[in-house]
Amino acid sequence: MSKSLTKVIYKPDHTSTDEYTVIVNPEEYKKWKAGAFDIFHSNQGHQGRLGQPSKQQLENDFGTSKDEEVVTQILQKGKDQGSDRIGSSNPGSTNVSRGR
């Protein structure tokens, strides 16, 4: 049985293609355990590759580069998206924006 994960996505500006994603266990998300998360960034929206943001990117968009403060902002302001495909062996074959 695979572990269910949820993506919480935050766009600093609704007209930008930049997105920040925190992949969380839904139960942990509900408990707000910020120390259990990693932050990812894509400058191409849902279809872009996820990579680690630089401290400068975090400072520019969140006013801080402290992971826990950034995650708190993403979880408070972002929108959650459940996904059974997160962590699959071939995540590149899934177009998350289309749900396939």
Image: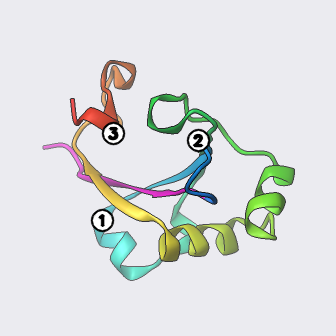
Mark 3: give few (<14), some (14-19) or many (20+) Cα within 10 Å: some
**Residue sitting farthest toward the front:** 15
Which label belongs to residue 86? 3
Give the magenta range. Answer: 1-11
Residue 43 point in image, percent of width and height? 63, 37
Residue at disc 1, secondary structure: helix
Whether 9 is among the magenta residues is yes
Type of residue at label 1? Pro
- Give above or below for 33 relative to 61: below
**Farthest residue, direction left:** 1
Residue 17, percent across and down?
A: 59, 41
Residue furthest out toward the right: 56
Q: CA distance from mark 1 to mark 2?
A: 25 Å
Say which residue label 2 marks: 17
Q: Are marks 3 and 2 in contact (CB under 8 Å)?
A: no
In the rendered view, tell whether residue 24 sits above or below residue 40. Answer: below
- Is 87 part of what is drawn in magenta? no
Q: Looking at the image, tell me whether mark 1 or mark 3 is earlier in sequence order.
A: 1
Identify which residue is drawn at 62% across, 58% down: 13
